Every structure is written in structure tokens, then in C-alpha cells.
Amino acid sequence: MERSERAVKNLKHFTIFVLSLATFSLAWSGHEAYTYLVVRSLPIDVDKLVQITPYTYKETRIYNEKHYYKDDFAGKRKFFDDLGDGVFPPDPEPVDGKLPVWQILTIYAQFPDFGMDEELNLSPLQALIGNSQGVRHMRYKLGPIEAFEGDRSFVHFVNMSREAFKKGDEYWGYRFLSYAIHYLEDLFQPYHNSPGTFWEVLSGLFDKKVMRMLNNAHYTYDNYLLFLVYYSKHAEDVREIIRQTQPRFVSGDPEKLIYEVMMYGYYKFPEVHREVRRAFSGILETRVPSMDDFKKLEGEGKLDKLLKITLDIVQTMTAVLKGFLITEISRIGQTIQQN
């Protein structure tokens, strides 16, 4: 085989492995609780009631229509863990067909993980992976290889939100905005920007144990935010950090904003991955840690470094998300006045 042909074949195998990691990828766990804390701490009236309206839109994207729910399901699902401490609400049903802004932004921030991006044929890359969820929720960069469209997911729903508000449809304006929030939060998760180190990914071509470890590491860090917000001994401190973080205004252009978010997540990957592997050594090779594992390791002081790194990410994510929401909701107010 010619050297150039061999190089092309190796690159193809390498690419297939990188893409295959997306098959198992989800997102930060705890979107609902984290987003609730962010939205409730915004310097705006998030208790404003909005009339629920029907879906009347033609979108340029395809979805798994079985799971692209267009009705309102406020009060019909259990969105928050019941800790009994009054921090998170019970997700009340609509009153007179209306919902407060905070509830729309909060409960629908989980919606993109309910299956709307699964079992689709999105692009030529779809032939290389078994599930389209990762295509829509990540934006991998590994050396010369860049793949997936998490950034486009964010931009799409920002534009849909703006279109809805121009029509005077506040309900779908906020609901589309909550979908956009989901993808912005996803791309702050470092594992949504890189699957592993170059050499780990290369090794995974020949060693399924390495692939399993990388997948488990990804899931572990997804679940760490859930643990911090709900169950950690530092939970109230983490919640207060989210509440008190001041907004950071990056850009009113959604494409520029999400590019900055992706680069930040990509930049933070090495230290997050290094610490996840160290803290959960011996577990990642076989499974994803349970909440009890998190509690045990936290009690032993083995998550201290990961906590410090993650709080830095959470603060940055919170500042940017608050700045984005304040900017968009200010735009909303201007649009409503013009209408």
C-alpha cells in the first residue's frame, strides 16, 4: 500500500473512533436546577406571566418528531429532585393558561435531551456513528479534525426565539430561548469540545478499554454538576456562587458568542480530564460513578481539585449565560414595544 493511501486509511479509522464517542454522549446533568438558579438571580421580572400559545413555526432543521413535543408540559413531569429544603420549586401547572417566564426558561432547558435529536440522518458523518444526539450537542476539535454542530444548534434557537418575539409570541420566544440555553451550557462542558487526549483517542482505535474509559469520563463530568447542585456537602455554597456571579457581556452576535464558549471549553479540557482521571481512577475503567461514589470520594478529599476547577467553569458559564439572557431579554422588551 502506498504511504499516502495508508495515511488516508489511518485518518479514516481515527476519525471513525472520534465520531463513535458521540454515540454515548449526553450533556451536563442538572440543566433544570442550574438554569433555575441562574434565571432566578437575574435582575429582571421573571415572574411575569406569559400566555401559552400553539406552535406555528416552520423550521429549517429536522427532528425526531416523536420526541419534538409541541404541547406544553408544565406541571406534568417531575423536573426537580425533591430535596425537601425549598430550594427548587415543584413545577406548578399553568394558571389560566399562563406560565411565569422563569418556569418556561427552566423546565424547557432540559428539552433537547428528551430525544428530539436522536435517530436522525443529519449529514455524511451520520454513516460513521450510531446516534445523532452527539452531532447536535457537541463541537469536537481534535488536532485537524473538527466535527458536529452544537454551535449551530445554539444559533438556530436564538434565531427562532427572535423570530417568535417579532411575531409577538412571547411563549415560544422564551421556549426557543430555553432550548438555546441548553446548547450554550452543553458547550461549556469540556468533554463536548474534545473526546480525550490525542494519544488516548489514537490508542482507542485498538483498545476498547480506552474507549470505555473516555466514555465513562464524559458521563462522570456530566453528572458532577448534578452532584454539586443537589447532593454535595458544598451544594449551598455552589448555589450561592451561581446566584451571586455577576453577568459578563461577551457579544450580541450568537455566532461570536458560541465560538468564545467553545474555545473556553476546549481550553479547559486538559485540566478537567486530567483531574477526572486521577480522582476516579479504578472506577472509570468499568463504569460511571454513582452519587454514592461522588459522596465517598468527596468525603475523602479526592474531589477537592476537581471542585476548584469546576467552580471556575461554573462561574464563567454563569456570568456568560446571565449576560446573554439579559441582552436577549432586553432585546425582547424593545421588540414587544415596537409591536
Image: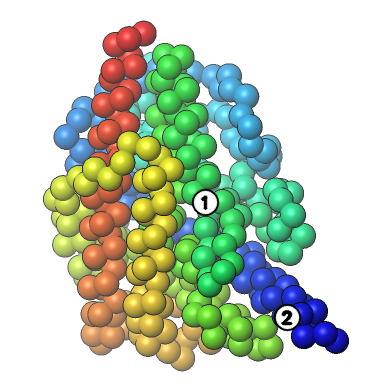
Establish if 288 lies above or below 65: below
Q: Secondary structure at mark 2?
A: helix
At 37% from the left edge and 54% from the top edge, which residue is drawn?
261
Q: Identify the image quadrant of the C terminus.
A: top left
Establish if 187 lies above or below 268: above
Q: Residues within 10 Å of mark 2 (few under 14, many from 20)?
A: few
Q: Give the residue pinned by disc 2.
A: 7
| Residue 182 x/y as whole percent | 43, 47
Q: Is 228 left, or right, of 56 in this rendering?
A: left
Count of number-bearing discs:
2
The amino acid type of the residue labelled 1 equals: Gly
The amino acid type of the residue labelled 2 equals: Ala
Q: Secondary structure at mark 1?
A: helix
At 29% from the left edge and 76% from the top edge, which residue is drawn?
306
Task: Name the foreground residue: 153 vs 57.
Answer: 153
Q: Identify the image quadrant of the N terminus.
A: bottom right
At 20% from the left edge and 68% from the top edge, which residue is drawn?
234
Q: Is residue 225 visible?
A: yes
Q: Give the residue pinned by disc 1.
A: 150
Determine the residue located farthest toward the bottom in the rendered image. 282
**Rendering quarter of residue 70:** top right
Q: Is 309 left, or right, of 12 in this rendering?
A: left
Q: Residues within 10 Å of mark 1 (few under 14, many from 20)?
A: many
Task: Name the foreground residue: 94 vs 57.
Answer: 57
First in sequence: mark 1 vs mark 2 = 2
Mark 1 and mark 2: Cα distance apart in space: 29 Å
| Residue 232 x/y as whole percent | 26, 69
